Image (cartoon, helix red, strand yellow):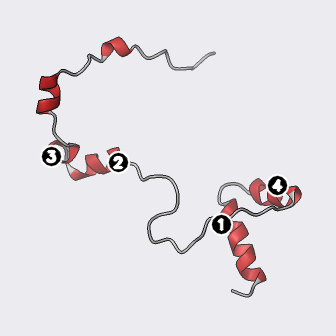
Amino acid sequence: MNKSKPPVDYDDNPEWTEEDFARARPASEVHPPHVVAALVKRGRGRPAGSDKDRIAIRVDRDVLARFKAAGPGWQSRINEALRKAVGL
């Protein structure tokens, strides 16, 4: 059974007029804070203030496969293994 969503019909969304734009208000002015928070998504990447650096490193495929096989968080597990290896 195909459970894919039907195609979106953009004709259901009328184009905004100048009056629509003039009446528009920020979400924070018309919705409660918990609704605004649900609408706003954090950007990708490390949070501001992170003490981590992005690097490129070559790792044997079998080593990488072992870390990835354990599921999400494999990069953090590699970081922890490196910390242990250098005595931190």
Mark toward the start of the polypeptide (2 vs 4): 2
Mark toward the start of the polypeptide (3 vs 4): 3
Residue 72, x across and y down, in percent: 66, 55
Q: Could you tell me how far apart the alpha carbons at marks 3 and 4 are, in whole angstroms?
A: 48 Å
Pointer 4: residues within 10 angstroms few (<14), some, or many (20+)?
few
Residue 30, x across and y down, in percent: 15, 42
The answer to whether 84 appears left or right of 25 in the picture is right
The relative height of residue 82 versus residue 60 in the rendered view (above or below) is below
As drawn, the label of residue 76 is 1
The answer to whether 18 appears left or right of 5 in the picture is left
Identify the secondary structure beneath mark 3: helix
Identify the secondary structure beneath mark 4: helix
The relative height of residue 88 versus residue 29 in the rendered view (above or below) is below
Camera-side residue of 23 and 80:
23
Q: Which residue is mark 3?
A: 29
Q: Amino acid under label 4?
A: Ala
Q: Amino acid under label 3?
A: Glu
Whether tag 3 and tag 4 are in contact, CB under 8 A, the answer is no
Q: Where does the C terminus fall, quadrant-wise?
A: bottom right
> Residue 12 occupies which quadrant of the picture?
top left
Whether tag 4 and tag 1 are in contact, CB under 8 A, the answer is no
Residue 38, x across and y down, in percent: 34, 47
Q: Which residue is mark 4?
A: 65
